Amino acid sequence: MREFKWVWGLMRKYRGIFFAALGLVFVHGLLSMINAPVQGKIVDEVIINGQIEKLLTLVLIMIGSTVLRAILRYTYLNMFEHVSQNVVYNARRDVFRKVQELDFDFFDRTKTGDIMARMTGDLEAVRHFTAYVMYSIFQHAVTFILVITFLFAINTTFTLILLAITPITGILAVRLTSKVKPAFSAIREQFSRLNSVVQENISGNRVVKAFAQEDYEIYKFSRENAGFKECNIQAAKIWERYLPVMDSVAGLLTVIAILAGGIMVITKNITLGELVTFNSFLWALNNPMRMIGWLVNDTQRFATSAEKVMMLLNREPRIKSKDGAVAEKLEGRVEFRNVCFGYGKEPVLKDISFCAYPGQTVAVVGPTGSGKSTLVSLISRFYDCTHGTVLIDDRDIKDYDVRALRANIAVAMQDIFLFSETIEGNIAYGAPDVSVEKVQWAAEMAGAHDFITEFPEDYDTIIGERGVGLSGGQKQRIALARALVMKAPIIILDDTTSSVDIETEHRIQQNLKNFCKNRTTFIIAHRISSVKHADLILVLENGEIVERGTHSELLSLKGRYYSTFVNQYGDFDK
C-alpha cells in the first residue's frame, strides 16, 4: 500500500483533473450500456413485430452513443496522460534532488546503472500505471457493475448462471498476484546490473579498446543480457500458467450464454431480443475477466518499480546540516584532533592531529593508499571522521551548514571530471556568476590560458564528455583553474600537477605563491618539487603521520621523506 500512497501524494495537484477524467469514464461506461438493449429492441420490435418506423430512431441512438463515447474517450485519455506526465515529471525531479543530497558514501556503494534504472525504467512503470492502469481498473469495474445491474433487471436467473464462473477468475487473480511480484523484483534487479555493465563499458570505452578487451566486454554483457532474458522468461512462465486459464474461463461465458439462453428462449422464459441483449453485453463481462490478469501484471510491475524508487527517495544522507547550523565566511584555520576514519571495519586514518593557519601551505605526501586523499576529504565533510574532531576556525565542522562549508573550500580533485560544456563553463562551475575576465585570470594562474586560446573557439570550445580530446595535463590545469576562480579561504589541491611538465609546474607554483598568501592551502603530491616550499609537510604511511616538518627538517631526519627525495633526485647535497 505504501507505493499507492506515494503515487497518490504525487497526484495531489492534479486530483481535480484525475477525478474529472474518472467522471468521464463513468459516463462513458453508462453510454456503453445503450447499444445492447437497443439491439434487443430492434430484434423484438422491428424484426419480429414489424414496427419498421422505429428502426431509424434506434439506429440514430446507437450512432449517437458511439460518437459521444469516442469523444469522451479521446478527452479522458488526454486528461489521464496530462496527469501521468506531470506525476512522472515531479517524481523524476524528486529523485534527482535526492541524488544531489546524498553523500559520497552512497555513490561509493551504488552503481551508476542502478541509479539510471530508477530514473528511467522504474519511473516509466509509474507513468504507465498512472496513465493507463488506474483508469483501466476503474473503467472495467464500472463496466462490470453496470452490466450486472442491467442484466439483473432483465432476467435474474440468466444473470446468476453467467456469474457462476466469476469466482474462479477471482481465485486465479489472487494467486497470480502472489507469484508475479517476486518475478518482477528479479527483473528489476537484473535490469540494474545490465544497465551498470553498459554504463561502465561506455564510460571506459577507451580502456577497453586500448587493451583490446572487446570480446571480454561482449561476454560480460551477454552474461547479464542472458540473465535478464531468463528473468523475463520466468515471469512469462507465470503468465502462461494463469492467463490462458483466465481467458478460457472468460470464453466460457459465450458458450454458457448460447446454451442457457437458447433453452430459456425455447421455454419462453426470455424473448429472442433479450437473448440478443445478453449476448451484446457479454463483451462487458468478458473484457474485465480477460483484462484482470494483465492489470494484475501491470500493477505488480508498478509496485515493484515504485518500491525501488521509494527506497532511493527514503535514503537519508549521512552527512547533513544539523538544526541551527552556522553559515558564515571562514578565515581558514584548520585543525585535526586525534582523527580516525575507516570506510569499513579497517581504519584508513589513525590518530591524525595537526593545525594549519591562514597563509600556510600544508603538504601531504606518502605512498599510494596511505590515506592522503581521505584526509583532505574530511575537511569538506565528504565523510565524517569516526573518532576525533575536525575544526575550522576553532569550531567543529559539524556545526557548519554543509553547503556553506563547502562554498568556503575550493577543491581540485585527483579524479578529474569535466562536464560536456564550454571551457569557460567548466572553469566557472563553482562560481557561475563570475566574469569572463576572472575566468581568464584563473586560467592564467593555472597555466591553462595559452593552450585554451589555441583552440578555434578558445574559451567557448565545447569539451567532450569527461574531457575527451584534452590531455591529462590540460584537464588538470582546467580543474585547477576551476578551484582558483572561487577564491575560497581554504584550497585543496589533490595531485593537480602530476601530469604537467616540470617547467609548467614551476610556473604554476610561482603564480600560486601570491594567491595563497592569505589562504590555507593543502597540497597532495608525489613530487618533492610540488611540496618542498610548504610550511608543513605531513608524511603518511598506513594512515598514520610518521613524519612532519618543513622540507629541510624532514631531510635531516633521514627517514621516509628523505628516501622519497633520494629516489627522485639522487643522494646529493641539499
Image: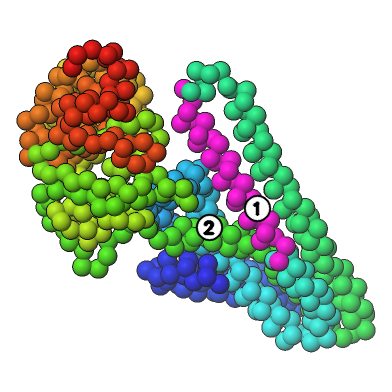
Q: Position of residue 258 (x, y in %)?
A: 87, 71
Q: Is residue 505 left or right of residue 180?
A: left
Sequence-first tag of 1 and 2: 1
Image height of 490 relative to 89, above or below:
above
Q: Which residue is mark 1?
A: 186
Q: Which residues, given as a range, are shown in magenta?
A: 178-206
Which quadrant, please, contains the N terminus? bottom right
Within 10 Å of disc 1 (Cα), the crowding (few <14, some 14-19, many 20+) is some
Q: Is residue 510 magenta?
A: no
Image height of 37 relative to 482, above or below:
below
What is the number of the mark on residue 376? none
Q: Which residue is mark 2?
A: 308
Q: How is the image coloured?
A: rainbow
Q: Amino acid at mark 2?
A: Lys
**Residue 6 visible:** yes
At 60% across and 51% down in the image, what residue appears?
A: 188
